[in-house]
Structures are given as structure tokens and as C-alpha cells.
Image: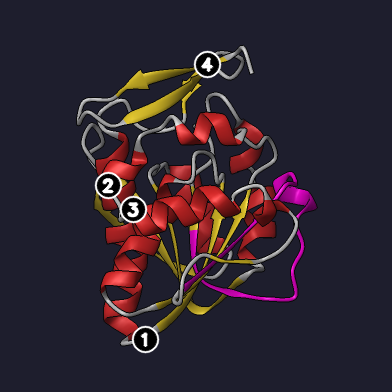
Amino acid sequence: MEHLSFAITSDGSKTIFNEQVGENYHSRHGALQESKHVFLGSGLSYFLENKKKKKVSVLEVGFGTGLNFLVSADYCVRNEIELDYFGIEAFPLNKELISQTAYNEYVSEELWNSFLNHYQEAFHQKCIINNQCTVQIIEKKLLDFSSNDQFDVIYFDAFAAIHQAEMWSLESLTHISKFIKTGGVFVTYAITGDLKRTMKSLGFSIEKVPGAAGKREMLRATKL
């Protein structure tokens, strides 16, 4: 994976720069703060606090380095929540790269070690990470993904539309919207007029919420 290299973001956490795409996997203003603010804070914990649930299912578009899974799993362990996590990733990173992210600094040693030990297996089947968390990673493009399940929360963490316009198309957003439950929450770091109009047309209520560092606003949408 010669086109991939590490970069240090503003909060000290690492991301990976993809030379072929021309973009980092996370915000250069802080990989960790973006993951915690956009996906954990505005997505998972928002859903759990509003629904008063102790069990939750998450589908992530763009599993990448696994950072969003790790911070979500760590939160769920600390708050005694059962987490069933699925990630879609068309171009998986190898275990060696994942192990060099140093994300072990932000989660428990037990969680980190279990994630690394099960990482490759998770592409073939659902893996039990600990007593409260399972993870499975699906190596497919978004439009090739299918499931009989629906999910409570969708993390939409694709590369930006300027680099990967097809991920933000009406076709892609219509497809992924099939897999969210009524009352479920869709979150992404981006917000545009087209994105808001598309999600509204697909039966979601739209919220502009404060963005992570470097972005004024982001989108949260709830399935009506």
C-alpha cells in the first residue's frame, strides 16, 4: 500500500493520507476529536440518550482505520451498552497499518488487543470483541452491500464529495437509507444543500448541528 502514509492531525492523533484519492481518512483538524464529536457524540450517544436504549446496532460506511468503531465500543463498554457494529469497506487496510495508528492510546488495552486479534477474521464473520461488543466488516462497495437487517445508527464516513462524488449521489444515499430503522439516526461530517434536500426527500427530518473542529456545521438526519 505504497500510496498510503501516516499524518499527524491537530489534536495529536494519527490519520492516513491516501495519495490516490488525495485525501486523509480523518479531519486534519483532529482525527480523534472528529470521531468523538461527529459519530459518537452527535450520532451514537445522541441516539441512546433519546431512546433510553441499552442495546444498539451501528452501520458504518467507510470503516477505514477502525477509529469510529473503537471510540464507539469504548463508550459502550463504559456505559454498559450492547453494541452490534457493521462496517462497509471496499478497500480494506492491512492489519500492520491498523496496528501503527496508535489508537490504543484512546481506548482500553483489552479492547485494542481484541480488535487487532479479530480484525482479519471480522471480514469473514461477526466477531465477539468482548462481552458487550461485536464487529463485522463487509468488503464491498456501497451499492453492492445488502442485508436483511436494519440499523439504529448509520455513520456515513465516506471521502468528501470532491474526491468521491459517487458516494454522495442520490443512488448511493437511497440505497443506504434502506438499512436504517424508523427513528434511526444518520450522521455525517458534511452538510450541503444537495445532501439536505436528498435526505429530506428520502423521508428524514434534517438537523444542522455544530460541526467538528474546522467545520461550522454537520448533518444529522432522523428516519421518520
The CA span between labels 1 and 2 is 25 Å
The CA span between labels 1 and 4 is 39 Å
The structure residue drawn at horizontal position 58% and vertical position 42%, both measured from the top left corner, is: 168
Magenta extent: 133-154
The CA span between labels 3 and 4 is 32 Å
Residue 200 x %, y %: 49, 62
> Of discs 2 and 3, which sits in the foreground?
3
Mark positioned earlier in the residue sequence (1 or 2): 1
Q: Which mark is residue 109?
A: 3
Q: Which residue is mark 4?
A: 22
Q: Which residue is mark 2?
A: 106
Kindly state the secondary structure of the residue where label 4 is placed.
loop
Q: Is residue 66 left or right of residue 118?
A: left
Mark positioned earlier in the residue sequence (3 or 1): 1
The answer to whether the residue labelled 4 contacts the one labelled 2, judged by CB atoms less than 8 Å apart, is: no
> Of discs 3 and 1, which sits in the foreground?
3
> Of discs 3 and 4, which sits in the foreground?
3
Mark positioned earlier in the residue sequence (3 or 4): 4
Q: Which residue is mark 1?
A: 53
Mark positioned earlier in the residue sequence (4 or 2): 4
Question: Is residue 102 covered in magenta?
Answer: no
